[in-house]
Image: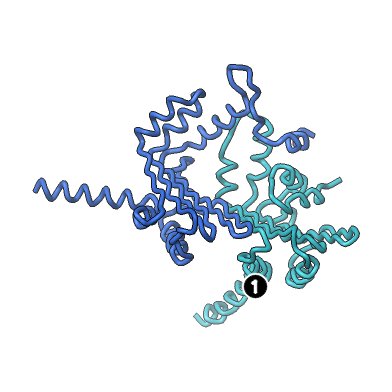
Chain colours: A blue, B cyan
Amino acid sequence: MKQLFIGLILSLSGFVSNAQDYGMYWKYKDYDGAIAVTVPRAAIHTGSWFLDKKADRKMLRQVRKARVLVFEGGNNPISEAEMRLFYKKAKKRNLEELLTVRSAGTRVWVLAKERRNVIRKIVVLVQESETFALISLRGKLRLEDIGKLLENMGKGDKDGEKGKPLLPDNMRAVIRI
Amino acid sequence: MKKIIFLLPICFLLAGSLTAQNDAINRFFSQYMDDERFTVVFVSPKMFSLVSKISTEDPDWEKFRDVVGGLTGLRVLTSDSISDGLKFYKEALTKVPAGEYDELLTVRDGKENVRIWVKDNGNIINELLLLVGAPDEFVLLSLTGKIDLDKVSNLSKGLDIDGVKHLEKVKKD
């Protein structure tokens, strides 16, 4: 009975891990030339200690898991069909497209899952003929905290370093008029 | 019952004609979507909705939110290094359903042509279409949502996307 219970938990945790990037990471992580990294929550939390601003630390701590899969130098095994399949699976699981850019041979997709003003997942895909990158972040990024982060970007820090304005100068000038 | 049977095909036909009006532009976008001479940018309604939900104490940001709050999508097809921009301009011009859009602006400056159309529903502009053609430049931009022309011209300063700078021209005097 105990074994059955443990087996069930292990298989379910496998589904959860796969769900983050709809199997693409797990399928290709052991391929030749793959750079595959999973950053667990503890490592992200530790990394946040080195950030100066509280808002930055808070934001980083809301990321529960990060995954990166990169193929470089002509080792890209991910076909168009695979991308379409990924897209189909992603849409089925409520991952919505935010932005798509294609310039020359480079394509960039940004997808996210948001519910009740909380971003649960962000996936960035970059594809070129010989290069592929998948970055997937899972967590609870509150829009309210993103707002605070943006605000802090505009404030500068304690050392008197001037912060960057949230909007470009030319746009600020026009909006003020 | 007979009425329903009679009305159903009419409804289908009407729905079909409404979607067909936009199809020509969509097909044009799709046709050149994978053409490496062009840069394609698509900002989804979800992106606009997310940005409009992020609030800060910065007054400029709040105004920016106000601008994007009503928008539901942006598509840009642009190229600034082609040799036959005018050919694409003419091709796109034939695809714009003239009866569906009101022409807002036409500029011809030397060999550069700029045209802006809007689709409105009473006082609200629902779609803005911008077409630019020059020998070495082509831009087709479609912006959807509740559009305030004054506010949209501000967007041109904030978005660093090729072709969007032409939106400045829609600013009311």
Q: Residue at x 54, y 58 (%)?
A: A128
Q: Which residue lies furthest to the top in this view?
A: A159
- The secondary structure type at the circle numbered 1 is helix
Side of A66 relative to A105 (left or right): left
Task: Residue type at mark 1: give it.
Answer: Ala
In the depicted view, which residue is nearer to us: A147 or B32?
B32
Q: What residue is drawn where x is 64% and y is 74%?
A: B17
Residue at the (58%, 56%) spot, across then down: A106
Indicate the chain on which mark 1 is placed: B
Instruction: Identify the residue shown where x is 42% and y is 38%.
Output: A140
Question: On screen, A1 above or below B103?
Answer: above
Q: How many labels does the image show?
A: 1
Q: Where is residue B99 in the image (x, y as percent from the top left)?
A: 77, 70
Q: Relative to A10, say whether B89 is above or below.
A: below
> Dot 1, how many residues are within 10 Å of its Cα: few (below 14), some (14-19), or many (20+)?
few
Residue B13 in view (yes/no): yes
Q: Is residue A83 above or below residue A159?
A: below
Where is residue B77? Give x, y as percent: 68, 60
Residue most extreme to the right? B110
Q: In this view, does B4 lie to the left or right of B170?
A: left
Where residue B113 sits: x, y (%)? 84, 61
User: Percent position (x, y) of residue B112?
Assistant: 85, 60
B36 relative position to A49: left or right: right
Q: Mark 1 points at which residue?
A: B20
**Could you tell whether B7 is left or right of A1 in the image?**
right
Which one is nearer the viewer's eye here, A62 or A129? A129
Asked if residue B121 shows in the view, the reply is: no
Quarter of the image where one finds residue A161: top right
